[in-house]
C-alpha cells in the first residue's frame, strides 16, 4: 500500500513534532512540518502532499482557513483542520473552505488516523467525480450533434457548441431558460408548431423521435431542417432528473439526397438514351440483315431461274430437233414421192401424200405459234382484251374444232346449265379450252368419257374438263406447268410440253387459277376458275 504524504502546518513546535511522530508511527510520510501558511504554500510545488493538516490559528499574515482556501483552489488539496477552538464563528469560516475533516485538540491517534483516511477517501472520490464530469463535458462538447440538457422543469442546464451554433443561442444566455423559448420547431409542410419532444419525453419517461420534415427556428428567425430525438435522464431508481435533446441539421443530408436523386435521374436518362441508341442500331442491323437476306434470296432465285433457263434451253433443243425433224422428214419424203413417181401414183395415193405434207406443215405452224406465245408471255407482251363472250357458244365452237381428234371409243358429255354471257378474253379462253380438251383426248387413247362442265357463278366462272385416261404420276404433278415438261408415262403420245404453260398464262391474264386432280390409270380433271368482270370497262 502506498503511504499517504501529509503536510503539517502547526505553529507550536512541540505540538507539531508530536503530530509528526504520531503520523509516522501510523505509517504516513510527513512531507514537511511548517509553522506558517506562507511556508506551507511555498513548499507545496516542490514536494506535493496528499493531504494537509492545518492549524487554524497561525502566526503570520494569513491564518489556516485562508491558507486552506488557497491550497484547495490552487492545488485541489484536501485540508483537515486542527484547532483547539470550536467557537461558532471559526467553524462557520472553516466550513466555507469545504474542509475534509476537523480535529479538536487534543485528539487521539486513532481519531487522527480515521479523520485522515476518511478525508483521503472523500478527496479521491471527489477527484474521480470531477474527472468524470470533465470527461462527460468534453465528450458532449466535441460530438458532432447538437445536445441540450434540461432539468425536469425543462430549464436548460447545458448546451454544447453545436447546439449553440444551430440555435444561435449561447449557453451562457440559455442556461436556466425554458427550453420552449430556445428550441422552437415547426412542420416543414403544414408550418404548424411541433410539440417540444422534451415535454413528451419528460411526461412519458420514454425516448421521443423528432418527426421528419421538422424545421428549427433559430434565434434570428432562420429555419434549419433538423432530425433527431429527446430522451429522459433517469437515476438508478428511475427517477427523472431531466432530459437530453439531441439533434442535427439535415441540410447536407437533404442536399445529398437531392444530388442522389438528380444523379439517379441523370443516370436513368443516360441508360434510356443508350438503350434507344442500341435499339436503333439493332433495328438498323436487323434491316441490314433482312436486306442481305433478301439479296441472297434474289440471288438464289436468279440462279435457280438461270439453271431453269439452261435446262429449258436443252429441252428446247431436244424437242425442237425432234419435233421439227419428224414433220420435215414427212414433208421431204412425201414431196419426193410426188415428184419422182407422180405418173405412177394413183390419185388416192397422191392425196394421202398431199394430206401428210399439209398436216406436217400445220403441226410445224402450231409449234411455231406455241413458241411465239410462250416468248410473248415471257416478255410480258401478251394482251388481255376482255369482251362480252357467250361462253356456252364458245365452248361449242372449240368442241367442233377438236372433233376430228375424237375416235369412236371416246364419248363426250357437255354440261352447261343455261345461256351464259360473261366478260372475258374470248381468244385466251379458246386457247385454254383447246389445249385442255386436246390433252383429254390425246391422253385417253383407250377412249372413255370426256366431260366438259361449265358452272357460271356471280363472281366467277368454272370450267371442268375430265377424262378417263392415263393420269399423271404423283412425282410429275408439281412440274407440269414448266415449259417442255412431259410426264414419265406418256409413251409415244405426240406433244412438246407447251400446252399447260399456255393454259396457265391465259388463266393468269384473267387473274384466275388452275386446279387439277389426277390418278394414274383412272383419269384427270382440270378445273379453271376465272373471275369475271361486271362489264367490258371493268
Ligand atoms: P403436251 O401434251 O404437248 O406434252 P402439255 O403442256 O399439254 O404438253 O402437257 C404437259 C404434260 O402433262 C403432258 O406431257 C402430260 O404428261 C401431262 N398431261 C396433260 N394433260 C393430261 C391429261 N389430260 N391426262 C394425262 N396427262 C396429261
Image (cartoon, helix red, strand yellow):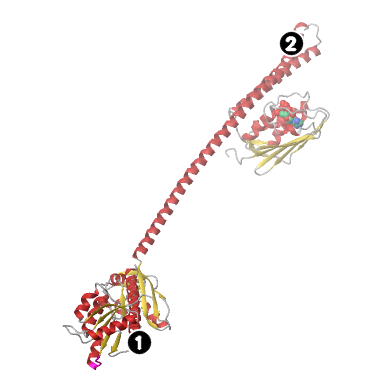
- Mark in front: 1 vs 2: 1
Residue designated by label 2: 335
Q: Is residue 347 left or right of residue 123?
A: right
Q: Which residue sits at x=42%, y=53%?
A: 267
Task: Please state the horizontal and vertical placement of residue 361, each as a whole percent of the image.
Answer: 70, 17
Tell me the quarter of the picture where residue 459 sits: top right
Q: Which residue sits at x=24%, y=73%?
A: 45
Residue 202 in view (yes/no): yes
Q: Is residue 170 left or right of residue 514?
A: left
Task: Please state the horizontal and vertical placement of residue 273, each as a whole percent of the image.
Answer: 43, 49
Q: Is residue 443 above or below residue 455?
A: above
Tell me the quarter of the picture where residue 510 sits: top right
Q: Is residue 350 above or below residue 528?
A: above
Label 2 sits on a secondary structure element that is helix
| CA separation in Å, label 1 and label 2 | 177 Å
Indicate the quadrant of ligand 1 in the picture: top right
Label 1 neighbour load within 10 Å: few <14, some 14-19, many 20+: few
Give yes or no for residue 248 being in the magenta stretch. no
Q: Give whichever of 406, 523 is nearer the camera.
A: 523
Task: Please state the horizontal and vertical placement of residue 178, each as a whole percent of the image.
Answer: 30, 81
| Total number of numbered discs in the rendering | 2
Label 2 neighbour load within 10 Å: few <14, some 14-19, many 20+: some
Task: Please state the horizontal and vertical placement of residue 257, each as a whole percent of the image.
Answer: 39, 61
Residue 399 in view (yes/no): no
Residue designated by label 1: 110
- Residue located farthest toward the bottom when viewing the structure as drawn: 87
Q: Quadrant of the N terminus?
A: bottom left
Main SS class of the magenta portion in the image: loop
Label 1 sits on a secondary structure element that is helix
Q: Is residue 111 above or below residue 358?
A: below
Tell me the quarter of the picture where residue 43 sits: bottom left
Q: Which residues are magenta?
A: 84-88
Amino acid at each position: 500500500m502506498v503511504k499517504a504524504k501529509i503536510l503539517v502546518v502547526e505553529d507550536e513546535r512541540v505540538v507539531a513534532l508530536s503530530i509528526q511522530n504520531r503520523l509516522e508511527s501510523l505509517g504516513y510520510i510527513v512531507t514537511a512540518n511548517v509553522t506558517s501558511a506562507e511556508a506551507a504554500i511555498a513548499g507545496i510545488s516542490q514536494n506535493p502532499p496528499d493531504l494537509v493538516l492545518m492549524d487554524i490559528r497561525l502566526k503570520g499574515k494569513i491564518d489556516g482557513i485562508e491558507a486552506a482556501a488557497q491550497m484547495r483552489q490552487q492545488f485541489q488539496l484536501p485540508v483537515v483542520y486542527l484547532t483547539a477552538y470550536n467557537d461558532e464563528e471559526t467553524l462557520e469560516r472553516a466550513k466555507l473552505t469545504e474542509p475534509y475533516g476537523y480535529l479538536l485538540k487534543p485528539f487521539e491517534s486513532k481519531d487522527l488516523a480515521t479523520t485522515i483516511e476518511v478525508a483521503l477517501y472523500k478527496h479521491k472520490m471527489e477527484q474521480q467525480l470531477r474527472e468524470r464530469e470533465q470527461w462527460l463535458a468534453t465528450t458532449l462538447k466535441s460530438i458532432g450533434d447538437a445536445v441540450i440538457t434540461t432539468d425536469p422543469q425543462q430549464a436548460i442546464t447545458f448546451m454544447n457548441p453545436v447546439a449553440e451554433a444551430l440555435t444561435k443561442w449561447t449557453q451562457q444566455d440559455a442556461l436556466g431558460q425554458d427550453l420552449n423559448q430556445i428550441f422552437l420547431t415547426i412542420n416543414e409542410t403544414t408550418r404548424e408548431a411541433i410539440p417540444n419532444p422534451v415535454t413528451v419525453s419528460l411526461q412519458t419517461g420514454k425516448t421521443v423521435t423528432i418527426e421528419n420534415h421538422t424545421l428549427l427556428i433559430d434565434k434570428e428567425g432562420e429555419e434549419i431542417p433538423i432530425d433527431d430525438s429527446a430522451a429522459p435522464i433517469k437515476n438508478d431508481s428511475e427517477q427523472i432528473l431531466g432530459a437530453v435533446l439531441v439533434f442535427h441539421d439535415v441540410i447536407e443530408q437533404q442536399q445529398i439526397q437531392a444530388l442522389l436523386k438528380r444523379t439517379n435521374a441523370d443516370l436513368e436518362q443516360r441508360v434510356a438514351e443508350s438503350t434507344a441508341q442500341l435499339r436503333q442500331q439493332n433495328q438498323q442491323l436487323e434491316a441490314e440483315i433482312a436486306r442481305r437476306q433478301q439479296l441472297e434470296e434474289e440471288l438464289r432465285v436468279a440462279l435457280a431461274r438461270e439453271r431453269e433457263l439452261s435446262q429449258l434451253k436443252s429441252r428446247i433443243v431436244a424437242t425442237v430437233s425432234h419435233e421439227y425433224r419428224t414433220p420435215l422428214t414427212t414433208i421431204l419424203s412425201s414431196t419426193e414421192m410426188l415428184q419422182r413417181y407422180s405418173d405412177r401414183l394413183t390419185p388416192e395415193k397422191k392425196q394421202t401424200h398431199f394430206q401428210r405434207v399439209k398436216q406436217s406443215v400445220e403441226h410445224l405452224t402450231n409449234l411455231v405459234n406455241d413458241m411465239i406465245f410462250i416468248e410473248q408471255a415471257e416478255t410480258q407482251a401478251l394482251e388481255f382484251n376482255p369482251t362480252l363472250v357467250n361462253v356456252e357458244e364458245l365452248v361449242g365452237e372449240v368442241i367442233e374444232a377438236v372433233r376430228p381428234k375424237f375416235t369412236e371409243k371416246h364419248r363426250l358429255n357437255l354440261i352447261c346449265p343455261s345461256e351464259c354471257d360473261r366478260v372475258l378474253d374470248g381468244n385466251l379462253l379458246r386457247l385454254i379450252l383447246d389445249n385442255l380438251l386436246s390433252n383429254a383426248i390425246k391422253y385417253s387413247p383407250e377412249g372413255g368419257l370426256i366431260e366438259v362442265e361449265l358452272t357460271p357463278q356471280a363472281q366467277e366462272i368454272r370450267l371442268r374438263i375430265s377424262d378417263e385416261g392415263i393420269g399423271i404420276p404423283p412425282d410429275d404433278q408439281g412440274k407440269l406447268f414448266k415449259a417442255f415438261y412431259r410426264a414419265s408415262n406418256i409413251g409415244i403420245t405426240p406433244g412438246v410440253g407447251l400446252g399447260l404453260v399456255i393454259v396457265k398464262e391465259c388463266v393468269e391474264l384473267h387473274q384466275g387459277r388452275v386446279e387439277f386432280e389426277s390418278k394414274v390409270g383412272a383419269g384427270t380433271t382440270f378445273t379453271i376458275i376465272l373471275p369475271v368482270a361486271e362489264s367490258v370497262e371493268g
